Image: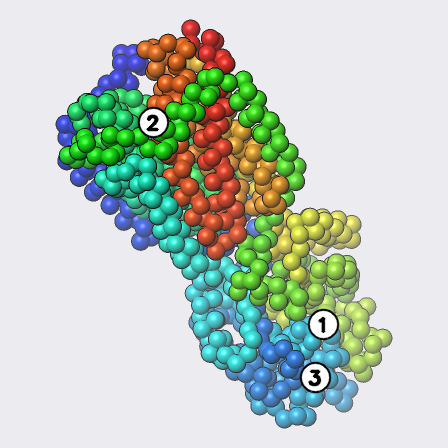
Amino acid sequence: MSIKSISSSIQKWFISQSLNHSKRSIVISIITTLIIGSGVQFLVIDDDLMKMLPKKLDSRVSWDAVQKEFGSTEVIFIAFGNQNQSIYQKEILSDSWELKKELKELPSVESVINISTSTRIDNVDGFMEIADLQEKQLLNQDQIESLKKYLDKNIKLKKKLLNKNETFLLTIVQPKTIIGLDKFRNEVVSVSSKILSKYETHYSGTAYITGSIPQLIREDVQVLIQIGMLIMVSILLFNLRSLSGVLMVFMVIVLSLLAMLGSMGWLYKITGSEKFLFALLNTSMPIILLTIANSDGVHVVTKFFKEYRSGKTSRESINEAMESLLLPIFITSITTIAAFLTMASSPLEPLVGYGICISIGIAWAWLLSSITLPAIINLKKWNPTSKAFISHSIFENFVEYLGRVIVLYPRYIFSIGIVLFLLGSTGIYKVIVDVNLASFFKPGTEIRNSMDFMDQEMTGTMDLRIRLEAEMKEPSVLRKVDSLQYFIEKNKSISITSSISDVVKKMHRTVMNDSAKYDNIPVEREKVNNLFTMYAMSGNVEDFSSMVNYNNSIGLVTSLSRVMSTEEVFLFVNNISDYIKNHFNDTIKVNITGMIVVIRDMVTLIIRSSAISIIFSLFLVIMIASIFFKKIYWGLLAALPLSGAVILNFGLMGHFNVTLNHITAILSSIIIGVGIDFAIHFISQYQKLSKSVDRENLSEETIRDVGYPIVLDAASNMGFGALIFSSFVPVQYIGGLMIFAMISTALGTLIVLASLMEILKLYLIK
């Protein structure tokens, strides 16, 4: 049996299921969708940046090692106080004590660092004495003055706990590693907000942002879907002028969304893989599938309306419509799925799950549009005298005019399209890659204001962690660590560094009558051991657990910095790597990690991921279209509008300073996946009409036949505009750029592709 006869048999089967078994087809599809959709209950929202990195990446391996040895490095920073009021007040110090006490009782909290948990090292009668920096909750004036005097003398400790103007106190809260950051964040904020209600309070840190995002995502998705559907339904209703027709398209959209989200939940439930966590970048998935499912539904409904308007019966109209559309809808679905499945090659794990789950949604939208939707149309009793059938819409009139213009001036129109493309693409070289979390939130929002406050007034919240495997009581090792800290602190963005070397220097100075001359590392190993022994006599060696492990074989250098640009991050990390390479020998194993290094690695992976996605997507789209249309040049023509749209997308990103990050990186696959639909429907109908329409009228007839659903599809896909209302800046960018992409791919098909095919019609149709 030939491929053509197999294709014909499959097509007849689909149409038979819709027309001869309408009710059965509808019931089966709805029940199956509900079964798949029940997986929604297993969806887990998590936006931990570290989970996006490959598990074998050096910075991820080092990060996991640090977490295991020193506890979670994802912390919450709480700054509280009142402008123009000193923190050296009984009440604020008492509230700091109470805050520490309440937070420590939370099951999600591992440790709390603030002024009431810090220690002081003093020389008392020639001996080292370890005491609490804040002796008790209620201090008298003399005790407050003593505390202030100690901090003034120990600048590094002061910078860690206070802001520059001494008007805000900082509390650092570390979670237990087994606790979800959303739960941790909610518990910390709940306790803190009660105690600190009379103060200006700022929350920040990776744990706070990561813990806040799940709720923001839930709220965002609900609002975006509602706005997107409102926009889409309004445009469809205005043009189709049939509430029944709009509701049928709407049905395809809702069931497809349910299947996609349900499949994501089931996949996470079954595999437990972090690929299927619902993260920030997944907020665009419902809107994207909404537009793809809408595209399939719009083509079926508009084609049915066109055939029914010509005087055919409802059954004949459905049969004619599906004979024309089953193949192009299948091809568009396959090519769109192929484009999104290229994300499976991405080194960023959430993009893998994104591609797989949205592909499931696309496949479900194809099945619903090919069987269920025509079955519902078949059961509906249509009124041939309704406005939807007796008059053309505004878009239909526009398309007919456009067809006439293109046939008259194909070369001029094609030239104008090329010029606009070249002008827009000039912005590509300006594209900046940036994954800094601060840029994800608008200035003026609560999270962004707090992050800016921490950068300007406190130590900042971006961290760099350097893990060292060596004998951490060895003076030569301690001196190397001290030199490394000095090198790091030369960077103007670094506010503070800390390690066991700082403690050793402080102890050495203290026992030597607090002489600045001895603010250094002792030369002999025995002296270092003696310092730790003296500390243990009046203090607790567990105080060093965030700096060295229990047997002093692994040390940790922690640096906090203000927000850096991507360029600064790359330069900073490279400089540190070079310093370590030149100053540390093979006896000391050094690994660097932390959010600063994560940003560097994310940038590299995003560039690589985007390049792979674009190349693979275009290759697959061209190959698939070439196979179905049986000529390679048809595949190249199908890829023309979307290739232009992808290049223009990056050009616009450069012109409008839209950064490339792990959220906007998915734009290329989206444009290719969504944009290919228009070209395939156009080429498919062009080939079909070429058998019955003369060459002179072929382009105009093709535009008249498929131009209206393409324009209506693109217009109703302005539902992408809903993304502009997102709480997250990168998602807003996706919304704006996708609106342009819809316009550019639709017009690229109906103007650039159509005019080029008109110019080449003697070669295309033989």
- The quarter in which the C terminus is drawn is top left
The answer to whether residue 380 is left or right of residue 368 is left
Query: Quick one: label 1 or label 2, which is nearer the N terminus?
Result: 1
Residue at (73, 77) in percent of width and height:
154
Query: Quick one: SS at disc 3?
Result: helix
Q: Mark 1: which amino acid? A: Lys
The answer to whether residue 570 is left or right of residue 261 is right
**Residue 765 image position (x, y, % from top left):** 42, 9
The structure's colour scheme is rainbow
Question: Relative to 137, is 683 above or below?
Answer: above
Badge 3 vs badge 1, beta-carbon distance below 8 Å: no
- The quarter in which the N terminus is drawn is top left
Q: CA distance from mark 3 to mark 1?
A: 14 Å
Q: Mark 3: which amino acid? A: Lys
> Which residue bears the numbered disc 1?
156
Q: Mark 2: which amino acid? A: Phe
Q: Give residue 460's quadrant in the image.
A: bottom right
Residue at (66, 61) in percent of width and height:
562
Query: Quick one: label 2 or label 3, which is nearer the N terminus?
Result: 3
Residue at (43, 39) in percent of width and height:
355
Query: Quick one: SS at disc 2?
Result: helix
Question: Relative to 705, is 289 above or below?
Answer: below
> Which residue bears the numbered disc 3?
148
> Which residue bears the numbered disc 2?
330
